[in-house]
Image (cartoon, rainbow, N blue to C red):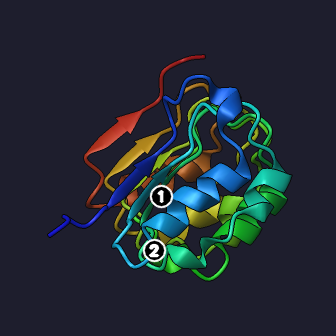
Amino acid sequence: VQAPVTEVSFASVTPIASVTPARVQKVLRKWEGHSIRSLKLGACKRLTNKFLQSLELPVLPELSQLSLRGCVQVTDRALRRMLRGRDTQLLALDFAHCWKIRSALNQLKLVNLRELDVSNCPSVQLEQVLRHTTELRELDLSGLQSVPRRIFTYISENPYLQKLSMRAA
């Protein structure tokens, strides 16, 4: 009896150039029916909007954790499209160093989010996310260009927040 696969990570694949949409899709299809809850595509610097749009994510109905850490080419449009319909089930998002992500998070319903890392995303907008995400326990805002005063209000009103990082860039 094979144990269920719960995490798929391409975050440290070498060489990273070998990670193509077709190969990622093949791996995801192989474990279709498993309870994959975590997908880590971090550090795939070649990962583009087209790459994300080519991934068929219906094979991941239980996805609750997503990491695109260091995927510097990913934009709001691709992120919205990828997460559409699964935003309420997401518990952890890691978009550290995703420089092109700006307003997509504010347009999603991340009401159950518990962990959010947007460190070194200089222009990311978070007001709506933090206002509606009352379960947030970990937040990393390190390296942001500026943090609006309202963000501090939302942070101070969250009774569950256990870890806040705001290191300088």
Circle 2 residue:
32
The percent coordinates of residue 71 (x first, y second) are 68, 37
Residue 4 drawn at (x, y percent) = 25, 67
Q: Disc 2, disc 1: CB below 8 Å? A: no
Q: Residues within 10 Å of mark 1 (few under 14, many from 20)?
A: some
Give the residue type at disc 2.
Answer: Glu
Judging from the image, what secondary structure is the residue with disc 2 in? loop
The three-letter amino acid code for the residue at tag 1 is: Tyr
* The residue positioned farthest toward the front in the image shown: 1
Q: CA distance from mark 2 to mark 1?
A: 38 Å
Nearer to the camera, 99 or 128: 99
Is residue 158 shown above or below 42? below
Tell me residue 11's x, y (percent). 50, 35
Whether residue 20 sits left or right of residue 111 in the image: it is right
Using a 10 Å C-alpha cutoff, classify the residue at mark 2 as few (fewer than 14 neighbours), some (14 to 19) or many (20 or more).
Answer: some
Q: Which residue is mark 1?
A: 154
Nearest the viewer among 146 and 23 is 23
Residue at image position (53%, 76%) is: 59
Disc 1 secondary structure class: helix
- In percent of the image, x 47 and y 80: which residue is there? 61
Q: Quadrant of residue 89?
A: bottom left
- Can residue 158 be seen? yes
Numbered mark located on residue 83 in the image:
none
Q: In this view, which residue lies farthest toward the left? A: 1
Find residue 80 and report its image quarter. bottom right
Instruction: Please identify the quadrant where the C terminus is shown.
Output: top right
The residue at the point 85 percent across, 54 percent down is 50
Q: Position of residue 105 (x, y in %)?
A: 66, 61
Q: Is residue 93 above or below residue 96?
A: below
Q: Quadrant of residue 52?
A: bottom right
Q: Is residue 146 visible?
A: no
